[in-house]
Image: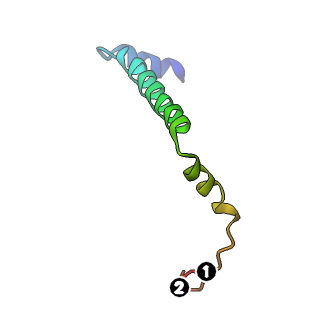
Amino acid sequence: MLKFIKGNLENIDGVAIYPMISLLIFFVFFAALFWWVFTAKKEHIKKVSNIPLEDVTLTPNNIEL
């Protein structure tokens, strides 16, 4: 099956640029995520990390009690 895909991709002009663009997008995304993690405020991290531990009771209309 791979030979069918590889054969089609070889016929496309400039197809070699797509893996480089994909790697660049991947690297930029994770570099930005890494930067955000280290610059996030500690209060925000603490607040967000306690969300699963909060005891919130919802009524049938989704109104917090």
Q: In this view, does 12 lie above or below 35?
A: above
Which residue has dot 1 on it?
Answer: 58
Q: Which of 17 and 63 is in front in this view?
A: 63
Q: Which amino acid does label 2 sit on?
A: Asn
Q: In this view, does 65 lie above or below 24?
A: below
Q: Residues within 10 Å of mark 2 (few under 14, many from 20)?
A: few
Q: Is mark 2 on a helix, strand or loop?
A: loop
Q: Is mark 1 on a helix, strand or loop?
A: loop
Left or right: 62 in relation to 14: right
Q: Which residue is drawn at 42% across and 28% down?
A: 25
Which residue has dot 2 on it?
Answer: 61
Left or right: 42 in relation to 8: right
Counting from the top left corner in percent of width and height, residue 7 is at 42, 16
Distance from the alpha carbon under mark 2 to that under mark 1: 8 Å
Q: Which residue is drawn at 50% across and 35% down?
A: 33
**Residue 12 bears which disc, if any?**
none
Q: Which residue is drawn at 53% across and 45% down?
A: 41
